[in-house]
Image: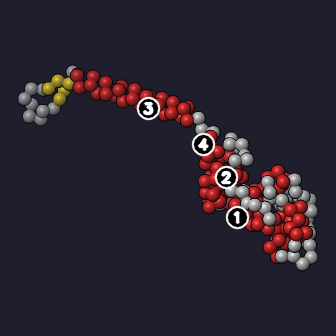
Amino acid sequence: IEGKVMMLKVVNNISSIKATLQTNFTLRSLRVGEVMEEIQGCINAAFRFTGNRQKIIHTQLSSMRREALCRLQGIEERSNAALYCKFDPLHLPEILALVGRTHGLSELHVALKSSLTMLLSTVDRVKCLEQEMAYYQAKVVNLQAEIAAIKRAEGNVVEVGNDPSNKRRRT
């Protein structure tokens, strides 16, 4: 069975993204004789990818497929966080969008939980707070202007004698 696992690694090595990129994607068919159905299924699945980018998307970025391939290849599975920390934090939003479009919301949830630390590392907290402060300062200025306009308007109102309707008249 070791030889069969080695053939799986030839067409889709899951040990790292770099290893996946270096695997063979030109082979279109490989039958390794009597083999476990699961290994042959993974080998056949590797042939469906037209390039290494697709192979990364459908194996490395799918936690369940990555887990199964690691188990079959005898590779100690790394955490999802260990996978996502390898990406440039500035590329993570695109990668997460790709995960959501390709694998659905449950896989996106796993990816978000796993990459949260990396995502937050791209946020300049001081800049965010400064922007929020500027927003609220502008809001205070607008509110002060509105209050001043109301007070000016109230200063121009005069009571009209003993008129039963007690209406105010502008001056």
Q: CA distance from mark 4 to mark 3?
A: 23 Å
- Secondary structure state at the residue bearing disc 3: helix
Mark 1 vs 3, N-terminal side: 1
Q: Position of residue 53 (x, y in %)?
A: 80, 53
Which residue in the structure is indicated by mark 1?
A: 64
Residue 81, numbered circle:
2
Which class describes the residues within 10 Å of circle 4: few (<14), some (14-19), or many (20+)? Answer: few
Mark 2 vs mark 4: in front: 2
Give the amino acid type for the residue marked by disc 4 in the picture: Leu
| Left or right, 138 with reference to 95 | left
Mark 2 vs 4, N-terminal side: 2
Q: Is residue 35 above or below residue 129?
A: below
For residue 54, which quarter of the picture? bottom right
Q: CA distance from mark 1 to mark 4?
A: 25 Å
Q: Is residue 70 visible?
A: yes
Which class describes the residues within 10 Å of circle 3: few (<14), some (14-19), or many (20+)? Answer: few
- Secondary structure state at the residue bearing disc 1: helix
Q: Is residue 58 visible?
A: no
Residue 117, numbered circle:
none
Mark 3 vs 2, N-terminal side: 2
Which class describes the residues within 10 Å of circle 1: few (<14), some (14-19), or many (20+)? Answer: few
Q: Is residue 50 above or below residue 142?
A: below
| Left or right, 97 with reference to 34 | left
Give the amino acid type for the residue marked by disc 2 in the picture: Ala
Q: Is residue 25 above or below residue 146?
A: below
Give the amino acid type for the residue marked by disc 3 in the picture: Tyr
Q: Is residue 80 above or below residue 34?
A: above
Q: Position of residue 41 (x, y in %)?
A: 82, 71
Q: CA distance from mark 3 to mark 2?
A: 36 Å
- Secondary structure state at the residue bearing disc 2: helix
Mark 1 vs mark 3: in front: 1
Residue 120, numbered circle:
4
